[in-house]
C-alpha cells in the first residue's frame, strides 16, 4: 500500500470518496492549467510576437517553419506512441467510461499533453477542451489506481477528471458538469452528479488560483437587448447551425476518406498544417488577423467588442471552417469547442452587421446575436443543449444573454435533428467501428430486453465442420469451449457437447448431437431468454431467418446475456 492510499484510509469511511474526488479534480485541473499555459506560451512566441514586430515575409517564413516542425512532431507522437490520443479525445473518454469501466492508461495523458500543446501552439486550428478532458480523465483514472481502486470501478474517477479538465479549460464549472452528464454519461439524473460537480468546482478553483477568475471572453456590460435582437436570433442560429453541420459533415467525410490514402498517417497532420498555413497567411495578408491559426480567441474577442469589418468577418469564417475540417479530419490533436464557438460567433456578427441598417440594432442586440450564434453552432454539433447555454453564460458572465441563448439553442437543436444529424462524437465512434448499443447499455430492463440479439451475439463462433476423429481432437485441444455448433456440408446439424465428444472419441463411435435452438439476429433479447429454456446444451444459434438448415451466423451463451445485463446494471448505478 502506497503512502497516498494509506493516508486516505486514515479518514472516516464516509469522507473517503469525497477526498478521492477532490484529488481527482486537483490532478485534472492542474493538468488543464499546465496545458493552457503551454499552448499560450508557444503561440505567443511563434505567432503573436513575430506578427507584431516582423514584416510579412519574415513572419511567413517563421510560421511556415513552426507549423511544419510542429505537425511532424505531432504525427510522430501519435503514430509512434499513442494513436488513441488523436482527435478531440472526448469520444475516447466516452468509450473508456463505458467499455473499460473508466480505466485509461497514463500514457494517453502524457502523449495528449505533449501533442496537444505542440499542435495548438504550433497553429493547428483546433480547441483545447478535448485534450484537457482526455488528460484529466487519464490522470484521474491513473490516480485511482494509485489509491487502490480496481480497474472495474474507475468510472467515477474518469467522469470527475473529465469534469475538472473541462471546467479548468473554460473557467466554467456548471457547463463542465452538464457536459459530462449529457455527453459522456448520457443521463442528467445520474448518481455520479455529486462527484462530477465537486470535481468541476475543484477544477475551477485550480484555474482561479493559477490564472485568475476572469471569463474566457471579456465583454462590456450588456444592457437588456431589444425585441429586434430576438427577431433576428432564429436567423443567426440557423446560419450558425449551418456552419456547424458543414463542419461536421466535411470532417467526417474527410476522416473516412483519408483512411484509404497512400500517404502515411505520420504525414496527415503535416498536410493539414500546410493548408492551415496557406489559408492563414492569405487571411493575415488581407486583413492583418491571425484568427485562422490555433484557437482564434483574439479575433473572436475583437469581433465581439471593438468590431471587425464585414469582409474580414467573412474571410475568417470561411477560412476557419475550411482549415478546421482539414485539421480534425486528418487526425490532428485538438478539440472542436473553440473552432465551433468561433464559427458561430462570426455568423452572429454577420447577421448583426446585415441587420443593423434595417432594424437599428443596438450594441447589446449585436452582441446577443453573436453569442447566440456561438451557442447555436456548438449545440448543433455536440447536441448537448444545456452545455451550449451554460458555457457561453459562464464564459461571458452576462445574465442578460440567457434568454437569447436559450432561443438560439432551441433553434439549432431543432434544425440539427430535422437534418438527421446525430451527435458528432457518437458518429466518430461509429466510424471507428464501435456500435453504440454495445458501448452504451440501455437505462432500463425493458429497453435492454427489446434490443436485437445482434447486440450481444458472438458472430465468430468455433464450429465443427467435420466429425472426423483427428479434426475433433485438434478442435478440443485448441479450444476450451463446452459446446460446439455442428455445420456439415454447409447445413446446420445441431450442437455437440464437449463431454460427448470426448466420450465418443474414447469409445470410437460417432458423437450424438443435441438439437439446435435457433433465433434470427433481429429477434429480441426477450425472445432469446424465452427459448433458452428449450436449449438443453445452453446455447442458442443464430441462423438466417432462424430456420433449420440455414447458414450459421453466430451463437449466444448464457454468459453473453449475463455480461450484457451486468453492463446495464453498472449504468443504473452510475
Image (cartoon, rainbow, N blue to C red):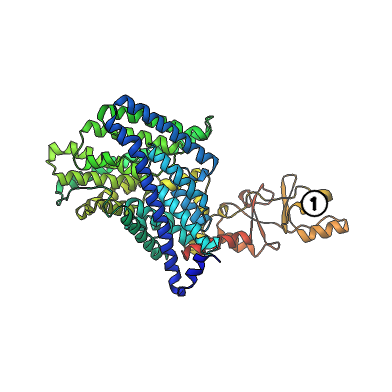
Considering every residue shown, the one lying at the far top of the view is 57
Q: Which residue is mark 1?
A: 472
Asked if residue 469 lies left or right of residue 410, the reply is: right
Expressed as whole percent of the image width and height from the top left, the position of residue 80 reads 55, 40
Residue 419 shows in the view = no
Expressed as whole percent of the image width and height from the top left, the position of residue 421 reads 39, 44
Q: Residue at x 27, y 44 (%)?
A: 373
Nearer to the camera, 302 or 177: 302
**118 w.r.t. 523: above or below:** above
Kindly indicate the quadrant of the structure image that contains residue 23.
bottom left
Q: Residue at x 40, y 59 (%)?
A: 26
Q: Residue at x 39, y 55 (%)?
A: 29
Nearer to the camera, 433 or 143: 143
Considering every residue shown, the one lying at the far bottom of the view is 12
Kindly indicate the quadrant of the structure image that contains residue 183.
bottom left
**259 w.r.t. 513: above or below:** above
**78 w.r.t. 461: above or below:** above
Kindly indicate the quadrant of the structure image that contains residue 563.
bottom right
Amino acid at each position: 500500500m502506497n503512502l497516498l492510499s494509506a493516508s486516505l484510509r486514515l479518514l472516516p469511511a464516509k469522507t473517503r470518496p469525497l477526498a478521492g474526488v477532490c484529488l481527482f479534480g486537483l490532478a485534472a485541473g492542474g493538468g488543464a492549467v499546465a496545458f493552457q499555459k503551454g499552448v499560450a506560451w508557444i503561440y505567443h512566441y511563434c505567432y503573436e510576437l513575430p506578427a507584431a514586430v516582423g514584416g510579412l515575409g519574415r513572419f511567413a517564413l517563421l510560421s511556415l517553419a513552426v507549423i511544419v516542425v510542429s505537425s511532424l512532431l505531432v504525427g510522430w507522437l501519435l503514430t509512434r506512441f499513442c494513436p488513441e490520443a488523436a482527435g478531440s479525445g472526448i469520444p475516447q473518454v466516452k468509450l473508456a467510461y463505458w467499455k473499460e469501466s473508466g480505466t485509461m492508461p497514463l500514457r494517453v495523458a502524457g502523449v495528449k499533453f505533449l501533442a496537444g500543446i505542440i499542435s495548438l501552439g504550433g497553429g493547428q486550428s483546433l480547441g483545447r477542451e478535448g485534450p484537457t478532458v482526455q488528460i484529466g480523465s487519464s490522470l484521474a483514472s491513473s490516480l485511482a489506481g494509485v489509491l487502490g481502486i480496481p480497474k472495474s470501478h474507475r468510472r467515477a474517477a474518469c467522469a470527475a477528471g473529465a469534469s475538472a479538465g473541462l471546467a479548468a479549460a473554460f473557467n466554467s464549472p456548471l457547463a463542465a458538469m452538464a457536459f459530462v452528464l449529457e455527453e459522456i454519461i448520457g443521463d442528467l439524473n445520474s448518481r455520479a452528479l455529486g462527484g462530477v460537480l465537486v470535481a468541476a468546482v475543484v477544477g475551477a478553483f485550480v484555474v482561479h488560483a493559477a490564472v485568475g477568475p476572469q471569463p474566457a471572453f471579456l465583454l462590456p456590460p450588456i444592457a437588456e437587448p431589444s425585441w429586434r435582437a430576438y427577431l433576428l436570433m432564429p436567423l443567426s442560429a440557423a446560419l450558425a447551425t449551418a456552419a456547424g453541420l458543414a463542419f461536421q459533415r466535411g470532417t467526417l467525410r474527410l476522416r473516412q476518406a483519408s483512411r484509404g490514402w497512400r500517404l502515411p498517417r505520420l504525414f496527415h497532420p503535416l498536410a493539414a498544417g500546410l493548408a492551415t498555413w496557406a489559408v492563414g497567411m492569405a487571411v493575415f495578408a488581407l486583413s492583418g488577423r491571425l484568427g485562422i491559426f490555433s484557437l482564434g480567441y483574439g479575433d473572436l474577442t475583437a469581433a465581439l467588442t471593438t468590431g471587425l469589418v464585414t469582409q474580414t468577418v467573412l474571410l475568417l469564417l470561411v477560412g476557419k471552417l475550411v482549415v478546421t475540417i482539414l485539421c480534425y479530419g486528418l487526425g490532428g490533436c485538438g478539440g472542436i469547442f473553440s473552432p465551433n464557438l468561433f464559427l458561430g460567433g462570426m455568423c452572429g456578427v454577420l447577421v448583426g452587421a446585415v441587420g443593423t441598417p434595417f432594424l437599428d440594432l443596438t450594441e447589446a442586440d449585436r452582441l446577443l446575436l453573436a453569442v447566440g450564434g456561438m451557442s447555436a453552432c456548438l449545440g448543433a454539433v455536440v447536441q448537448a443543449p444545456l452545455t451550449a447555454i451554460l458555457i457561453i453564460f459562464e464564459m461571458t458572465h452576462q445574465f442578460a444573454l440567457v434568454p437569447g441563448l436559450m432561443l438560439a439553442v432551441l433553434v439549432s437543436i431543432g434544425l440539427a435533428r430535422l437534418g438527421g444529424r446525430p451527435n458528432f462524437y457518437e458518429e466518430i465512434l461509429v466510424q471507428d467501428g464501435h456500435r453504440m448499443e454495445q458501448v452504451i447499455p440501455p437505462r432500463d430492463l425493458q429497453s435492454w430486453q427489446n434490443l436485437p440479439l445482434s447486440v450481444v451475439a458472438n458472430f465468430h463462433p468455433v464450429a465443427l465442420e467435420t466429425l472426423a476423429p483427428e479434426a475433433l481432437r485438434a478442435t478440443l485441444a485448441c479450444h476450451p469451449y463446452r459446446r460446439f455448433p455442428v455445420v456439415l456440408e454447409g447445413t446446420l446439424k445441431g450442437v455437440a457437447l464437449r463431454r460427448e465428444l470426448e466420450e465418443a472419441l474414447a469409445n470410437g463411435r460417432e458423437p450424438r448431437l443435441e438439437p439446435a435452438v435457433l433465433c434470427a439476429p433481429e429477434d429480441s433479447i426477450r425472445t432469446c431468454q424465452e427459448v433458452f429454456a428449450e436449449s438443453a446444451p445452453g446455447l442458442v444459434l443464430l441462423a438466417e431467418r432462424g430456420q433449420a438448415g440455414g447458414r450459421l451466423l453466430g451463437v449466444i451463451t448464457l454468459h453473453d446475456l449475463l455480461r450484457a445485463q451486468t453492463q446495464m446494471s453498472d449504468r443504473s448505478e452510475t
